Image (tube, rainbow, N blue to C red):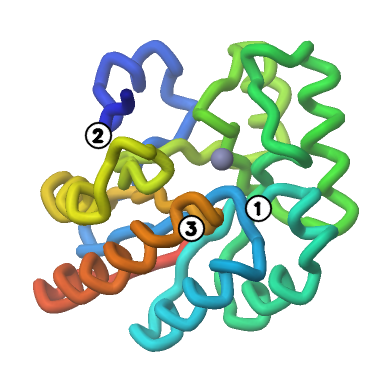
Amino acid sequence: MYLVKSPNILRKIYGKSLCWEMPKGNKSIYLTFDDGPVPEITPSVLKILSDFNIKATFFCVGENIQKHTDVFNQILEQGHSVGNHTYNHINGWKTPKNEYIENILKSESFLHTKLFRPPYGKITPAEKKLLKKNYRIILWTILSGDFDAKTSKEQCLENVLKYTNEGAIVVFHDSIKSKEKLLYALPKFIEHFQAKGYNFEKISY
Ligand SMILES: [Zn+2]
């Protein structure tokens, strides 16, 4: 069970120091890809982005970067933004604060970024307070649902077509389990909004 559009109540509980959407005014959409890089899917995502000539933001898992440095370097070479998504995808609600911060910093030696996204969107107020000194913490506006076994590829596409608007931060996953849905929905999604005059931008610090 997941909510495609992040509800206002959740944004209020979490407070304003987290970024749920980008400013409106320039007809932009912000694509983000979580949990990579992996050779099975990330290069295909990069090819799609390159074909459409757009930039996006990749929230990378540290151990995947270490295992697949060549794929990570391709992301950088193509001019996309990268963000920290912890070293091994841990849950901020279930991890003691200091351990959580250390885990994030473990990626810092090879992932130089000021963007952070907590896995599962789960972060405690104490963790948030510490992290926001050094990071811009990015949540999302729209979840494609590509990670969900019960969501079909058609539903995944409908989720992003129906709810995306100007300034939206949209989440997909460059992970093996999301591969089929992602490769189906992503090009159609980009095509749809480009035809309506939208731009796709990466997130900067
Ligand atoms: Zn994740």
Give the percent coordinates (x, y) of residue 89: 68, 36
Circle 3 crowding by C-alpha within 10 Å: few under 14, some 14–19, many from 20: many
> Is there CB contact under 8 Å for labels 1 and 3?
no
Between tags 1 and 3, which lies in front?
Answer: 1
Viewer-closest of 153 and 89: 153
2 or 3: tag closer to the N-terminus? 2
Circle 1 crowding by C-alpha within 10 Å: few under 14, some 14–19, many from 20: many
Q: Which residue is mark 2?
A: 5
Where disc 3 sits, the SS reads: loop
* Whole-number angstrom distance, CA of label 1 to CA of label 2: 22 Å
Q: Which residue is mark 1?
A: 60
Q: Is the shortest distance between ligand 1 and the CB of mark 3 under 8 Å?
A: no
Q: Image quarter for residue 99?
A: top right
* Three-letter amino acid code of the residue under disc 3: Ile
Give the percent coordinates (x, y) of residue 28: 27, 63
- Ligand 1 position by quadrant: top right
* Whole-number angstrom distance, CA of label 1 to CA of label 3: 14 Å
Residue appearing at x 48%, y 72% in the figure: 45
Between tags 2 and 3, which lies in front?
Answer: 2
Q: Which residue is mark 3?
A: 203
Circle 2 crowding by C-alpha within 10 Å: few under 14, some 14–19, many from 20: some
* Residue 51 as seen in the image, left or right of residue 161: right
Residue appearing at x 67%, y 78% in the figure: 74
Q: Is residue 79 visible?
A: yes
Where disc 1 sits, the SS reads: strand
1 or 3: tag closer to the N-terminus? 1
Residue appearing at x 51%, y 60% in the figure: 57
* Whole-number angstrom distance, CA of label 2 to CA of label 3: 19 Å
